[in-house]
Image (tube, grey):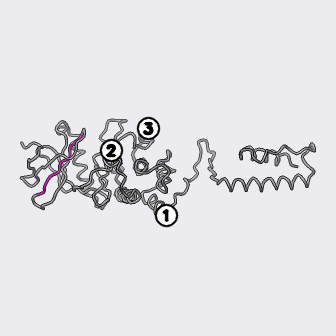
Amino acid sequence: MTEFAAGASLHDGRYRLERRLGSGGMAAVWLAHDATLDRPVAIKALSDLLADDEGYVRRFRREARVVAGLSHPNLVRVFDFGLDPRPYLVMEYVEGGTLADRLRAGDRDFDSEGLVRGLLDALDHVHGARIVHRDVKPSNVLVGADGRPRLTDFGIALPEDATQLTRTGGVMGTARFLAPEVLEGGAATPASDLYSLGMLVRECIETGEEPLGMLADRLTARDPVERPQSAAEALALLEDQTVPLPPTRPQRGGRREYEVHVSGRAAAIGVAVLAALVLVIALATGGGGDGEPPAAAPRNAPLSRQLDALERAVKAAP
């Protein structure tokens, strides 16, 4: 039986292994040459320790089926699948390494916005096929020499209505990039993929970089309802260069929670208008019920204190 090693051939000599590109606990990836089509390919081979585990073999087969049914310029293509000497996938070879490799090396010489747009477009395509990736992270994004990102590694991707292969209560994925609802045992959804992408965006940008910073905040909202409801919506927000505030949502117990975001200048104008109104009321009525209007807060007091003083003044007016 042929072993995976430099110089070995697979599939009756069609694929010749050249060198190993990387490895993990589940699989190793090799650079190989496709003699039939005369092109480089990447071969992802299941670890020999897992090759006899039917669950992992099923997952490998599923990855081949999932990706074979997708076609998008920001997804790595899968060309072939084999079982001898152990399960392997033949994939598009992308020269340039992973986004994680670049970030570890301090290489940020790439178009962050273009990268995020490409990944959002890819997720829109994936979700449109009713598939959840479940493991969006920098090490699963290849960045080609042309700068184009390609999402890869659908090893734990699932159709939205599929049953997981993990034990009951098990969580798959990388904890740092998993959405809170998934970490708490909930089902992975397109919204959880968007959360993972938001965490990836944070890795790619400098603090305060806009509009990507605002988009990352929206994507990583703890409540899935407050995230964009689809990759297409998130992409539209980015294309518009504006990221609106999340919608209000009901609190537990039936009460509603409203968030009011006001600029400092607008708040100051509001205080001045309210103060003028209180003064008009006081002049028209001769002051409060005891003849002495409530004390006003100094002009240089914090805005919250000024608002509290004005509220007391309004309540004291007849």
Depth order, front residue of 141/155: 141
Judging by the rendered image, the residue that carries numbered circle 1 is 240
Residue 304: image quadrant is top right
**Residue 240 placement, left or right of 77:** right
Which one is in front in this view, the residue at disc 3 or the one at disc 2? 3
Q: Which residues are magenta?
A: 26-34
Q: Position of residue 65 (x, y in %)?
A: 24, 53
Residue type highlighted by circle 2: Thr
> Which quadrant of the rendered structure holds the N terminus?
top left
- Disc 3 is placed on an element classified as loop
Looking at the image, is mark 3 or mark 2 earlier in the sequence?
2
Judging by the rendered image, the residue that carries numbered circle 3 is 184
- Asked if the stretch drawn in magenta spans residue 210, the answer is no
- Asked if the stretch drawn in magenta spans residue 27, the answer is yes
- Picture layout, residue 302 above or below residue 71: above
Query: Dot 2, crowdedness within 10 Å: few (<14), some or many (≥20)?
Result: few
SS assignment for the magenta stretch, majority: strand
Query: Dot 1, crowdedness within 10 Å: few (<14), some or many (≥20)?
Result: few
- Disc 2 is placed on an element classified as loop
